[in-house]
Image (tube, rainbow, N blue to C red):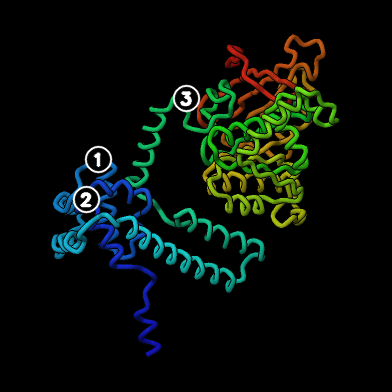
Amino acid sequence: MAMEDLLTRQMPHSLEGEQAVLGSMLIDAGCVKDVMDKLRPSDFYLRQNREIFETIYTMFSYARPIDGITVFEEMQKAGLVGENTRSYLAQLMEITPTSANVMEYVAIVRDKALLRGVAQAASEITALVQEGVGEASEILEAAEQKVYAIRRGQSAQEMVPLRLVLPDVLDRLSEMSESENHLPGLSTGLSAVDQKITGLNKSDLILLAARPGMGKTSFALNVALNVAKSTKKTVAVFSLEMSREQLATRLLSAEALVENTRLKTGMLRETDWEKIAGAATVLNKVDIRIDDNPMLSVADMNAKCRRLDDLGLVVIDYLQLMTSAGGKSGGGESRQQVVSDMSRMLKIMAKELNVPVICLSQLSRANEKRDDKRPMLSDLRESGAIEQDADIVLFLYRDDYYNEDSEKHNIAECIVAKNRHGETGKVELRWMPEYTQFSTLDNRYGDE
């Protein structure tokens, strides 16, 4: 009897739930859009149900009328019709008296799909452990990736047909055409920079590099605060150099427009307290998570970010201070190889989390030996692989840092040295050191 149970055992699914969802869509096309937001074809266990849902999904994407007859015709064109397809579609409509409870049926189907995903992941994780290939930290990372893929409603190994990707692209185009700023990505809060890089796009690795003292951390915090305020999404900031209190002080200074030195020393005026109170009210409403553990690896950061809901942006300050996985020294590898590996892992992390990742980086002293001290891609410290992995490379440069008599006092150049989304060039920004803040200069950017 035990052997018969083993042979007939099926993965979790609800035949009635799947049929009720399909029946509801066939008798009431008005509920299709609600179902599409919650389910994907892979959520259906039975192949026939999956094919019917995929057909409706495609028809909905192209705004075609949906009912029993049109769905049958579409399936016939796609070669998905069997002997009982017509009668099965009629049966689905017959056993579903109303679509009023369709979201309850959707929840049942989604729940069973999640359980199947957990079961499959558990099986794959068990196989990884039994094979014994790789270190425990690597197996743990692989296990977390599998579970995270389930949480996002995706299979790590699933190949998606182009026809199922196109509707998302068309929806995105529609959103952008209706938007005021026409940016495909999140705004940095600096309009001139946004125009150059088309905002901060999902799954992009953005490298922000400069020599010490140019304002890398301030620039990144300005962007992080703007994203948190404008999108209401969670922003994760990993600071391997500065403490959480120092970062909070900088954010407070930039938002309140109170000199950073006054906040550090406590020499505050009465008017400063009013500004600080207003800024604190604003900062209390944003969701910026700060981690100042100096021993974090990319895997640690990835694991922490996976647990955050509604993540919008990740900021890492800075690359050269990070440790390799598990805090290892690299097993005799050169530091260049270790940094190269980490930059590749950061790009993978950006794709997996599907959010922009801004990683700060120190530059070598090579630029200081040149007459023109503006940074170049060859100045990227310890790793040419960073340049390859990054979608966008930004350099910060201030002429008055090197030349006290510079005409461009408190003017910073944001040099776009690499840009997968458009042209390179430079943007001039106003630098307010007392508030550790950057702002856009009107009509002061060019394409040199």
Which label was assigned to residue 63? 1
- Give the crowd class for mark 3: few <14, some 14-19, many >=20 residues within 10 Å: some
Where residue 224 appears, x then y in whole percent? 63, 35
Q: Locate residue 194: give its quadrant.
A: top right
Q: Which residue is mark 2?
A: 28
Residue at 29 percent of width and 62 percent of height: 18
Q: Horizontal placement of 374 versus 358: left or right?
A: right
**Left or right: 444 with respect to 431?**
left
Above or below: residue 316 compared with residue 440: below
**Do residues under tags 2 and 1 come within 8 Å of each other at their CB atoms?**
no
Which structural element holds mark 1?
Answer: loop
Rendered image quadrant of residue 190? top right
Amino acid carrying mark 3 in the image: Asn
Residue 278, image quadrant: top right
* Residue position for label 3: 181
The answer to whether residue 448 is seen in the rendering is yes
Residue type at the position of mark 1:
Ala
- Label 1 and label 3: CA atoms lie apart by 27 Å
Asked whether residue 378 is in view, the answer is no
Instruction: Tell me the amino acid under the disc marked 2.
Output: Asp
